Image (cartoon, rainbow, N blue to C red):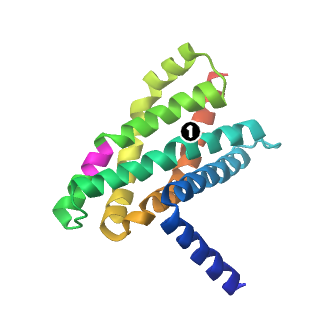
Amino acid sequence: MGSVAKKSLQQYMLQLQKHPLRTKVITAGVLSAISDIVSQKLSGIQKLQVKRILLKVLLGAAYLGPVGHFFHLMLDKLFKGKRDTKTVAKKVVLEQVTISPLNNLLFMIYYGLAIEGRPWIHVKSKVKKEYLTVQYASWTFWPVVGWINHQYVPLQLRVVVQSIVAFAWGIFLNLRARSMALTKS
């Protein structure tokens, strides 16, 4: 069994090297789907909502994978691939004041409109009420991930690492969104 896992990892790394964007897009989509399946089960949904899973795949593949890919490339070009403490701190701060707030805002809007199917007026109201709480929670968690990612993880693996951690973050956001929806019902 170990050789199958080793071969799979080697094949994945080869694909990541040959087709970095495509591999990150697929990885983000698959991990978004798995995260949503776990979220559905943890929130008590008995029968998996396939449409919801597909919408999460779309979010991961169309947004999270490509944006992460190009954002990390841009950061590395901007800071010339440096990994000293001062540079890593700048990367983390830049990430936390730009892409982090955008990701959380877009997730909340997408979740409300596409996944829950709520009207814009309700989604807008919910975002106004909950966004800062979600963003503050994000700022207690993601800077540590960013630091580790920028300091120790090779560029080609940063989006993959972020996607794996986002798996857990996605569960948190899904459960939070679900609990807010239940309190409104």
What span is in magenta? 92-96
Helix, strand or loop at label 1? It is helix
**Residue 120 spot, x, y in % from top left:** 56, 16
Quadrant into which the N terminus falls:
bottom right
Residue 167 figure quarter: bottom right
The amino acid sitting under disc 1 is Arg
Which residue in the rendered view is the most extreme toward the front? 18
Query: What residue is drawn where x is 52% and y is 56%?
Result: 24
In the displayed structure image, the side of residue 82 where residue 158 appears, left or right: right
* Number of numbered discs overlaid on the protein picture: 1
Q: Residue at x 38, y 68 (%)?
A: 153
**Where residue 177 sits: x, y (%)?**
58, 34
Compared across the picture, whether 14 is left or right of 100 comes to right
Q: Position of residue 150 (x, y in %)?
A: 32, 62
Look at the picture and state if 84 lies above or below 163.
below
For the point 38% across and 69% down, the residue is: 154
Q: Residue at x 73, y 48 (%)?
A: 41
Residue 49: tell me if it is visible.
no
Residue 179 visible within the image: yes
User: Is residue 128 rendered magenta in the image?
Assistant: no
Residue 95 included in the magenta stretch of the image: yes
Q: Which residue is mark 1?
A: 176
Q: Position of residue 121 (x, y in %)?
A: 54, 13
